[in-house]
Amino acid sequence: MSDHEQVHNRVAMLRAERRVSRRELADALGVHYQTVGYLERGEFNPSLQLALRIARFFEVPVEFVFSLDAFPRIGPGVD
């Protein structure tokens, strides 16, 4: 998948922050837990409906979870 086709996301970060397992998130969204893994690794772009359900689950705007541009690193960077 080229950079212009990739949808970047913060699903893994949100899951870790909220202490939600892949299986718990998948169950809440009605998808297979492997789908969450594919999504987190950037191997799967969600449908609009799934993206909105993920944002609703985490109670954040969809733009906080998904972006066409890479998110800036959080924390100290390595130069």
Image (cartoon, rainbow, N blue to C red):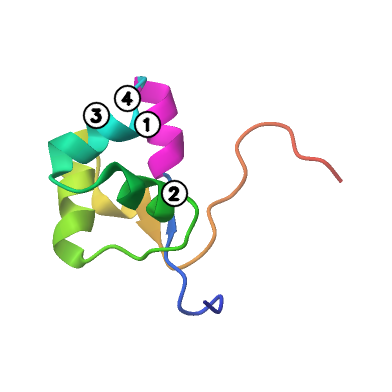
SS type, badge 3: helix
Tell me, for residue 20, which label it has, or none: 4
Residue identifier under label 3: 24
Tell me the CA gap for discs 4 and 2. 13 Å
Q: Amino acid at mark 4?
A: Val
Tell me if mark 4 has few (under 14), some (14-19) or many (20+) residues whose alpha carbon lies within 10 angstroms of its own. Answer: few
Q: Are marks 2 and 1 in contact (CB under 8 Å)?
A: yes
Q: Is residue 59 visible?
A: no
SS type, badge 2: helix
Q: Amino acid at mark 2?
A: Glu
Tell me the CA gap for discs 3 and 2. 15 Å
Highlighted range, magenta: 11-18
12 inside magenta stretch: yes
Q: Are marks 4 and 2 in contact (CB under 8 Å)?
A: no
SS type, badge 1: helix
Figure check: 75 above or below 60 = above
47 inside magenta stretch: no
Q: Are marks 3 and 4 in contact (CB under 8 Å)?
A: yes
Tell me the CA gap for discs 1 and 3. 10 Å
Q: Quadrant of residue 11?
A: top left
Q: Earlier in the sequence, mark 1 or mark 3?
A: 1
Q: Earlier in the sequence, mark 2 or mark 1?
A: 1
Figure check: 44 above or below 10 = below
Tell me if mark 1 has few (under 14), some (14-19) or many (20+) residues whose alpha carbon lies within 10 angstroms of its own. Answer: some
Magenta stretch mostly in which secondary structure? helix
Residue identifier under label 1: 15
Q: Amino acid at mark 1?
A: Arg
Task: Compare residues 56 and 42 and report the one nearer the observer.
Answer: 42
Which residue is painted at 44% across and 68% down in the image? 68
Residue identifier under label 2: 40
For residue 48, side relative to residue 74 (left or right): left
